[in-house]
Structure formats: C-alpha cells, structure tokens
C-alpha cells in the first residue's frame, strides 16, 4: 500500500441498537501489508464496530482485531487470513471466541482441512466486496455505514457495498 495513514470520518448507524455515531479515525496499514489484506481488516472492523474491537497495530503472531477483558484475556480473536495450525491452536486456547473472516478460497480450504471447533467461527468476506472496498480507499475518506440486523451497507457517497456480518456468541462486550 502506498498510503501510510488514512483518515476515516465514519458515520455509523444502527436502528436496532440505537447506535448513531460520528467519529474520526486515523488508520495505518501494517508495513508491507497488501491493500486487499488491509481492506479485509477494515471490513471486519466495521462488522464488529459496535463491540469496539482493537485493530492490531503491527503484523505479528496475534489477531488482526481483538477484544480484551479487564484482565487482558482475549474475549474475541479475529483473523482475516486463515491461520496456520500453530496460530489456530494458540488462538483457540487464549480466546473465548475465534472469528475467521476469510476470502472464498481460504474459507473452502480451511473448512476442508479443519474439524469443527466449538469456539471457532468461520465466515466469508467475498472477493468482490474486498474489490469494492479497495476502490473506496483513499487518504481522506468519509463513509456512512448502516447496520440492519446482520447486514452492513457501506457507502462513500459514490459507491455502496453490502456485507453480511457474523452472528457472534452472546456475552461479548
């Protein structure tokens, strides 16, 4: 990615939870992070926005997004790339819930190679949605997000994309 810092003015609206937010964020991709990976992280963050997840600030052997409780225990560990077996084991042992938000091919490979684990949830961020998000990325962005149940509509005033959000376990806050 060419951009080092992106300014996002976000209007987030959800009638179901009566959340109507207007915030400004300064977001930075990881060094050497691809635009596609950054877009998936951004879309995952918007799906989980009401939980106020933290975005990882560096690419490491940890989650892309996460929620910690008051004891610094992971309540939610979210990855946008399929983790290797060692990282998956670490995530399932250190977190109450693991959420993998994968592209179509990674989702299929992951489901074919891993047994169902009770605290792992896998969902898809379609490639065409990532491509739409990529076309909306620029240094200064103004996005409006409308959440309706498990559906997000995201617009920059010129383009609109839709994304299904994961249904998470209760007890996350």
Image: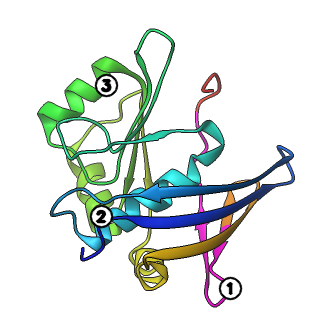
Residue 46 falls in which quadrant of the image? bottom right
Residue at 28%, 28% in the rendered image: 91
Separation of marks 3 and 2 at Cα, in angstroms: 22 Å
In-image side of 13 versus 52 (left or right): right
- In terms of secondary structure, where does tag 3 sit? helix
Residue at 61%, 65% in the rendered image: 9
In-image side of 109 versus 147 (left or right): left
Q: Position of residue 36 (x, y in %)?
A: 31, 71
Q: Position of residue 26 (x, y in %)?
A: 46, 57
Separation of marks 1 and 2 at Cα, in angstroms: 23 Å
Q: Earlier in the sequence, mark 3 or mark 2?
A: 2
Q: Position of residue 105 (x, y in %)?
A: 27, 67
| Residue wearing tag 1 | 157
Q: Position of residue 142 (x, y in %)?
A: 62, 74
- In terms of secondary structure, where does tag 2 sit? helix
What is the quadrant of the N terminus in the image?
bottom left
Identity of the residue furthest to the top in this view? 71
| Residue wearing tag 3 | 92
Separation of marks 3 and 1 at Cα, in angstroms: 39 Å
| Residue wearing tag 2 | 37
* Residue numbers of the magenta segment: 153-168
Q: Is residue 60 shown in magenta?
A: no
Which one is nearer the viewer's eye here, 2 or 71? 2
Q: Nearer the viewer, mark 3 or mark 1?
A: 1
User: Relative to residue 72, is residue 143 depicted above or below?
Assistant: below
Residue at 49%, 81% in the rendered image: 136
- Mark 2 surroundings within 10 Å by alpha-carbon count, few (fewer than 14), some (14 through 19), many (20 or more): some
Residue 31 falls in which quadrant of the image? bottom left
């Amino acid at each position: 990615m060419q951009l080092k810092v992106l300014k996002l003015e976000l209007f987030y609206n959800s009638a179901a939870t009566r959340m109507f937010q207007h915030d400004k964020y300064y977001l930075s991709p990881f060094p050497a992070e691809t635009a596609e990976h950054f877009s998936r992280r951004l879309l995952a963050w918007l799906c989980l926005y009401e939980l106020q997840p933290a975005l990882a600030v560096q690419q490491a052997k940890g989650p892309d997004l996460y929620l910690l409780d008051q004891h610094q225990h992971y309540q939610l560990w979210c990855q946008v790339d399929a983790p290797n077996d060692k990282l998956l084991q670490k995530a399932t042992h250190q977190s109450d819930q693991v959420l993998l938000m994968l592209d179509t091919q990674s989702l299929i490979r992951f489901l074919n190679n891993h047994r169902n684990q009770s605290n792992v949830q896998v969902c898809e961020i379609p490639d065409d949605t990532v491509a739409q998000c990529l076309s909306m990325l620029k240094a200064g962005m103004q996005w409006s997000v409308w959440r309706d149940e498990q559906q997000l509509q995201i617009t920059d005033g010129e383009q609109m994309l839709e994304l299904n959000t994961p249904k998470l376990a209760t007890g996350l806050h």
